[in-house]
Image (tube, grey):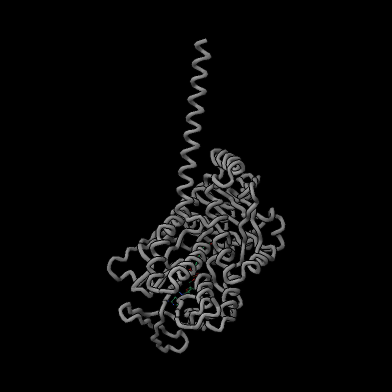
């Protein structure tokens, strides 16, 4: 692919995780690509303001990183997480391994590290031009021209390309212009829960059981912690906004943590907790769905711009990377017919993106509540047992989402027929047992 003559051009709006990966994939195909990012170059900043400090990287994300040759490097800068470590209210812990059959893991990776690494790869490609401090301000779908404003000089730039991709996040500017066109449907749902990032510093990080994603499930709320390479842990507290608002002073806060997360309080530290909590506001979580991602045979939205989701399946970035992987596949299939590619992208991706948005919403309930229930433990045991006997057929939901590239909608379908089989088997068992009891009584 690299040897193709440069006959096509592309513009990518947004140099976040998905945009910077997409740039390299297109450049590898021979496209002359310009990336416009409204912020400065995060590689030049001391610490960039990302929304979460680390992320769980899994199979779908890895396969896209592999395409641009940085999967191994990314994994060497990450920490494997082989399961969830559940903390109950008394401080007791229980490890629930994600994949006891073939020991697959997810990986905790720094958001800033990954974004910087992706920009480095993009910059090395001679087909790529990176333009920071440039904000998309207008789009004309008829002429195909877009308008950008230089944040530094105020200069206005009008430009176009064969393919224009919006990877400009959940509050995408490109999408906002698409929303004004006929037959473009869009839904946006903020959930009642917000999140706040806290931290366990490196000096106390060693006290947490390694190689796990730690969860403090508390029904209405939950806290999680993902490991960082420096031995610290990024802790995220998810709870209803009303609850955040009700904690108004240090006394309330320490009381709340002592009651609800007693084992986490000494790890975070009382002073640090007060600082984090009162100097930051909880952020909102949004789920976004669209009925199409393409427009006028040239424009396409991908990543959070197309399908932002709540973060409870750890799939937002992974799904965005999978968008890039799919885009590359469709370009292969159409031999770089951009018009057909954009239409096919919507056709192939929209059901899948809606499915993972729904799964992510469902998983919040699983993480904060269901994991503590005996029915979850029994189901996990059954899944493990059946996956051992029928490894190709019985793929538990979490595994199909995180350790395979099975279409997300198929993962849900799988879970449905597995439920039906288990339900039918249990019903049959109960019937047999009841019949036996009746027969024994009759004798
Ligand atoms: P963004 O990262 O939002 O990047 C968009 C870029 O576009 C930004 O750089 C922005 O400056 C730029 N931009 C915006 N508007 C314009 C404009 N008009 N002109 C030019 N540039 C513009 N995902 C996972 O896979 N695993 C996880 O464990 C995980 N954990 C998460 C935890 C939390 C708390 C949250 C909130 C999200 C989590 N995610 C996770 C989701 C993940 O963060 C997102 O899916 C991912 O960042 C989306 O990348 P993106 O490039 O599409 O958008």
20 or 49: nearer the eye?
20
Residue 288 in picture, x, y percent from top left: 41, 62
Q: Quadrant of residue 146?
A: bottom left
Relative vertical location of residue 312 with respect to residue 375 in this rendering, above or below: below
Residue 127 in picture, x, y percent from top left: 53, 83
Q: Residue at x 59, y 70 (%)?
A: 114
In the displayed structure, does residue 190 sit left or right of residue 57?
left
Q: Which residue is drawn at 50% across and 15% down?
A: 439
229 or 224: nearer the eye?
229
Residue 7 visible? The answer is yes
Q: Which residue in the rendered view is the most extreme toward the top? A: 443
Relative vertical location of residue 353 with respect to residue 424 in this rendering, above or below: below
Q: Residue at x 52, y 59 (%)?
A: 315
Q: Which residue in the rendered view is the most extreme toward the left? A: 182
Residue 125 in picture, x, y percent from top left: 57, 81
- Which image quadrant: the N terminus? bottom right
Residue 380 visible? The answer is no
Number of callouts in the render? Answer: 0
Residue 159 in picture, x, y percent from top left: 40, 85
373 or 4: nearer the eye?
4
Relative vertical location of residue 432 with respect to residue 287 in this rendering, above or below: above
């Amino acid at each position: 692919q690299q040897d193709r003559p440069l006959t096509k051009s592309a513009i990518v709006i947004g140099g976040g995780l998905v945009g910077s990966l997409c740039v390299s994939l297109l450049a590898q195909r021979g496209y002359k690509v310009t990336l416009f990012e409204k912020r400065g170059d995060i590689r030049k900043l001391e610490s960039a303001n990302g929304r979460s400090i680390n992320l769980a990287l899994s199979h779908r994300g890895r396969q896209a990183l592999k395409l641009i040759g940085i999967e191994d490097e990314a994994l060497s800068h990450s920490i494997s997480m082989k399961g969830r470590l559940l903390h109950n209210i008394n401080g007791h812990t229980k490890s629930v391994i994600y994949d006891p059959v073939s020991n697959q893991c997810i990986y905790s990776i720094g958001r800033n590290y990954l974004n910087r690494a992706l920009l480095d790869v993009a910059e090395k490609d001679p087909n790529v031009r990176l333009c920071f401090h440039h904000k998309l301000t207008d789009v004309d779908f008829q002429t195909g021209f877009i308008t950008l404003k230089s944040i530094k000089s105020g200069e206005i730039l009008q430009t176009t390309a064969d393919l224009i991709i919006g990877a400009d996040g959940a509050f995408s500017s490109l999408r906002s212009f698409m929303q004004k066109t006929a037959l473009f449907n869009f839904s946006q749902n903020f959930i009642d829960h917000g999140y706040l990032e806290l931290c366990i510093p490196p000096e106390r990080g060693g006290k947490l059981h390694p190689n796990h994603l730690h969860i403090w499930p508390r029904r209405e709320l939950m806290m999680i912690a993902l490991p960082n390479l420096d031995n610290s842990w990024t802790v995220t507290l998810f709870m209803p906004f009303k609850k955040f608002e009700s904690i108004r002073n240090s006394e309330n806060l320490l009381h709340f943590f002592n009651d609800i997360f007693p084992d986490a309080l000494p790890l975070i530290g009382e002073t640090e907790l007060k600082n984090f909590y009162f100097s930051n506001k909880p952020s909102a979580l949004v789920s976004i769905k669209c009925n199409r991602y393409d427009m006028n045979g040239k424009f396409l939205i991908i990543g959070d711009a197309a399908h932002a989701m709540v973060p409870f399946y750890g799939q937002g970035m992974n799904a965005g990377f999978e968008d890039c992987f799919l885009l590359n596949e469709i370009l292969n299939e159409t031999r770089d017919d951009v018009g057909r590619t954009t239409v096919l992208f919507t056709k192939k991706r929209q059901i899948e993106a809606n499915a993972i948005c729904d799964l992510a919403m469902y998983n919040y309930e699983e993480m904060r509540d269901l994991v503590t229930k005996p029915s979850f433990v029994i189901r996990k045991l059954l899944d493990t047992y059946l996956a051992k006997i029928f490894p190709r057929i019985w793929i538990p939901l979490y595994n199909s989402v995180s350790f395979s590239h099975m279409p997300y909608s198929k993962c849900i379908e799988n879970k449905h027929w597995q439920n039906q089989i288990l339900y039918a088997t249990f019903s049959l068992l109960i019937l047999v047992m009841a019949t036996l009891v009746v027969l024994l009584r009759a004798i």
